Amino acid sequence: MVGVLDMIPAFASFGVKAPQGVAAGLIGPSAAFQGGVLTWVLGMQLHFFIALMAATIYCFAGRKMNFLVDHWFVCGLFYGTAVFLFMNLVLLPLSALHMAGPYQLRSLVDGILGNMVEIGLPISFSLHRFPTLPSKESTT
């Protein structure tokens, strides 16, 4: 769900080549944008893998820290911000894109608010709504 919610504005802003922009972080821009369908698929896979890892980290942390489940709204907003900061201050500078500042204030605000709504809140609400996995006995 988070991968879809986060990719919608990417498609709106960057068009159908948005997944190739994600792939460019791994293989470089020239290879990504010349690779056609294969790099488009690679970018989508990377995008959903990153979304899955963001959700996994929050859910594992939520198993140990109950306040993440109980106060899902505030924690989700902060988690979305943390994901944005990690992506922009750690992952993108280390990627093949080497993207690092200077940042425009509007882009930062849009990015942080977007991550809060598209990433943080859906992940935190999902853990709040489904705090435990169903047992095998209850499904039979």
Image: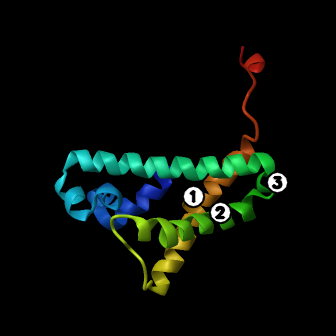
Of 25 and 114, nearer the camera is 25
Q: In which quarter of the image is the C terminus?
A: top right
Residue drawn at point x = 72 percent, y = 32 percent = 133
Residue 109, percent from left and from top: 53, 79
Q: Does the residue at mark 3 contact the one at mark 1 (Cβ under 8 Å)? A: no
Nearer-N-terminus badge (2/3): 3
Residue 139, percent from left and from top: 71, 19
Residue 135, percent from left and from top: 75, 24
Q: Distance between the residues labelled 3 and 1?
A: 18 Å
Q: Does the residue at mark 1 contact the one at mark 2 (Cβ under 8 Å)? A: yes
Q: How far apart are marks 1 and 2 (CA)?
A: 8 Å
Q: Which of marks 1 and 2 is in front?
A: 2
Q: Residues within 10 Å of mark 3 (few under 14, many from 20)?
A: some
Residue 76's label in the rendered image is none
Write down the residue under mark 1. 119
Q: In this view, does 89 lie above or below 138?
A: below
Q: Is residue 28 left or right of residue 1?
A: left
Q: Does the residue at mark 2 contact the one at mark 3 (Cβ under 8 Å)? A: no
Q: Can I make out residue 90 in this image?
A: yes
User: Looking at the picture, which amino acid does disc 1 mark?
Assistant: Ile
User: Looking at the picture, which amino acid does disc 2 mark?
Assistant: Tyr
Q: How crowded is mark 1: few (under 14 residues within 10 Å), some or many (20 or more)?
A: many
SS for tag 1? helix
Residue 70's label in the rendered image is 3
Residue 79's label in the rendered image is 2
Q: Which of marks 2 and 3 is in front?
A: 2
Q: How crowded is mark 2: few (under 14 residues within 10 Å), some or many (20 or more)?
A: many
Instruction: Give the farthest residue toward the front.
Output: 94
